Image (cartoon, coloured by chain):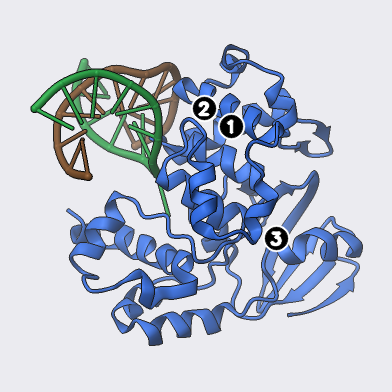
Chain colours: A blue, B green, C brown
Amino acid sequence: MTYEVTERGIEIIPKGKFDLKNTFECGQCFRWDQRNDDSYSGIVRGKFATLRSENEKVIIEGITEEDFHEIWKDYFDLNNDYDGIRNEISENCPRLSCAVGSIDGIRILSQEPWEALCSFIISQNNNIPRIKGIITRLCEGFGDKIDHGSTFPSAERLAELEPEDLSEIRAGFRARYIIDAAKKVSSGEIYLDEMYTAPISDCRTQLMRITGVGAKVAECTLLYGLHRLEAFPVDVWMKKALATHFSGVTIEQIGRYAGIAQQYIFHYSRLNPELVE
DNA sequence: GCCCAGGTATAAA
DNA sequence: TTTATACATGGG
């Protein structure tokens, strides 16, 4: 990745393609919104940014160069070679080539661990517009106000509350799951930061001690919140696709990039619903 | 009204 | 260990 600072912002030439729509709308995140001019805006670690695509460049507006290095470079995984990863997945597992080729430019964001955990608890048995609505109300009601929006409330802040206190966000049965997670994370009973490097099976066991966190939410937290690219959040559709069209594909073949491969399989299954009916 | 949403807890077989 | 059902809410 190379970049330069101009009057417009930080102009980046990423390693491998970076498609804003495919990255922000593939279901991995809920706090980025498309604006009327094709750019996307969001808030990460309390900082607001706007991204715009221009030829091979991506321009990040409204940030400092210091924050680019502190936050955004890692958040967008800009030093990872996603074209190389795609090739590696296809070579290790040729059966997945059609899925890998079905979408280009997805990058796995490195979201804040607590926000990812909380967001994917909310996502269960839910649809994306409503998930975003609940998260927006959670931030506006319990986060800190900043320019252009609100921060995601910390686990410590939410741990002060009881499920009834969340009624205004209309999270339904998930309210008590959010509060249980907040209490376990803020007390240190669950220590998210160690999950960047701890054995992944230990991380899964720990996360699933939270009420409302099953296998799927645990894997999503590890993939999207802790950037464990080997995590593998399968859903019902993917299980069917793996049992039929991609039969024979094993997690060992996909190896260290199972989570990224899963993103391609998920997209391909959506494009070809007959594969999973 | 009815069905479903990138699931999980709970109770039963 | 596996299978059925409820769960809150709202978009299509």
State yes or no: discs 1 and 2 in contact (Cβ < 8 Å): yes
For disc 2, the chain is A
Regarding mark 3 in the picture, which secondary structure is present there?
helix
Disc 3 crowd rating (10 Å Cα; few below 14, some 14-19, many 20+) is some
Q: Residue furthest bottom?
A: A91
Of all residues, the one furthest to the top in this rendering is A164
1 or 3: tag closer to the N-terminus: 3
Residue at image mark 3: A75
Label 2 secondary element? helix
Residue A218 appears at what percent x and percent y? Answer: 49, 47
Amino acid under label 3? Tyr
Give the amino acid at mark 2.
Answer: Tyr
Q: Check the image and report above or below for A169 versus A239.
A: above
Residue underneath mark 1? A181
Tell me the residue that label 2 is attached to.
A177
Please state the chain letter of the residue tagged with numbered disc 3 in the rendered image. Answer: A
